[in-house]
Amino acid sequence: MKILVTGAKGFVGRNLCSQLNNIKEGKALWYKGVQIDDVFEYDLGSTQEELDHYCAEADFVFNLAGVNRPQNQEEFMQGNYGFASTLLDTLKVHKNICPVMLSSSVQASLTGRFGNSKYGHSKKAGEDLFLQYGQEVGAKILIYRFPNLFGKWCRPNYNSAIATFCNNIANDLPIQVNDRSVEMELLYIDDLVDEMIAALVGKEHRCEFEGLNVISTEEGRYCYCPIIHKTTLGEVVDIINECALAVNPAEGKVQIAMAVPQGSLEYKLMTTYLSYLPQYKTVIDLKMNVDHRGSFTELIHTLNNGQVSININKPGITKGEHWHHSKWETFIVVAGHALIQLRKEGTKEVWSYEVSGEKIQAVHMLPGYTHNIINLSETEDLVTVMYCNEVFNPNRADTYFDPVEKK
């Protein structure tokens, strides 16, 4: 299958083309039934000759070209309707009746606050042109009315508030929020790309519109992505600020792992925020607690599920020799050679585990068992990843000294 993408260098086009090329190169095998031989990328700077060639060869067209922020309002119609006419006329010349997708906008509904939108009128004109073209030549037409889109590679200070907020907060620039209660419908770029790739094999979601409301129906004239997040402007800003604090904590603080379940709005906003992070914020100095025995460094805290740390034992050094009432730990040696020992309080039997970075294993430190970790090497440091089910609380440490092996 040969795919033509117009507007290939724009936000949606760039994300779509990157994934289409991943499929073409065999890097995204989970898209079952999608075979791509060529991706034709058309944008500003491309020639009419290139468009001719692409329209002659294409098996599917994604028309993402359009104008969002013109110098004057008349450019809306020229950019959004005019190029659509050129594209369809070129397909006609080559008698190519392959499926054609059109990126439209919810503003094309011309209802509510969009009633007088010149941008909406230009998008609606484009929709009508495509529907007429489909009836005339018998081509399959897929019209998507996009709500607010967000994700990586979106241009800030252009047509996406989320891109602007993420960019400004990441770069310590001010943001302006006039009304936190403004309702938003958000579509994440990866969800949209998945829907568009599904359309290649006839698995698009069809609908009709009642104003801004989507009415799902298999015979609908329009298409939609079913994964939409309904929220408010205030909630979006709060989540982005939370992302910023989690990724770059205040000096002396440990990173907090936010609750970002896969598929959630928080997950997608965190991913988007990270894509705007400047170089100097991608590295964080961690507080190393160093003494003659080695070091102990907290790597990350979670809100409800404890912390992860890295521990270094100098050669021959023993650490631990304590037990806990309720908290538990897991030791994972990733470099070096160690002996881990546990003994249940009130008993004499010692459990011993010889472990090394050559065969990585996890050893649980059980509640009520005193435990230690010994570096068996006389020359090399021992490096251990340690998980604890709770963040250390110095006011209630739940840690009690007792050597594993009594003298």
Image: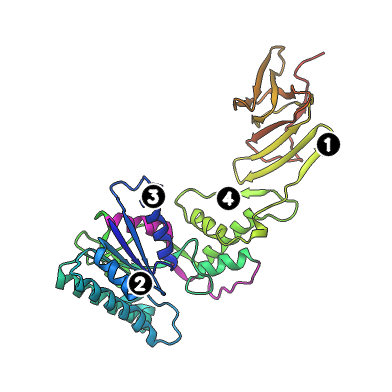
Q: Which residue is mark 2?
A: 106
Q: Nearer the viewer, mark 2 or mark 1?
A: 1
Left or right, 13 with respect to 3, comes to right
Residue type pointed to by label 2: Val
Looking at the rendered structure, the secondary structure element under dot 2 is helix
Q: Which residue is mark 1?
A: 291
Q: Which residue is mark 3?
A: 25
Left or right, 239 with respect to 208, comes to right
Residue type pointed to by label 3: Glu
The crowding category of the residue bearing disc 3, from other C-alpha atoms within 10 Å (few below 14, some 14 to 19, many at least 20), is few
Left or right, 264 with respect to 166, comes to left
Furthest-front residue in this view: 49
> Is residue 143 something one can see in this rendering?
no
Magenta span covers which residues? 172-200
Q: Nearer the viewer, mark 2 or mark 3?
A: 3
Whole-angstrom CA distance, mark 4 to mark 2, is: 32 Å
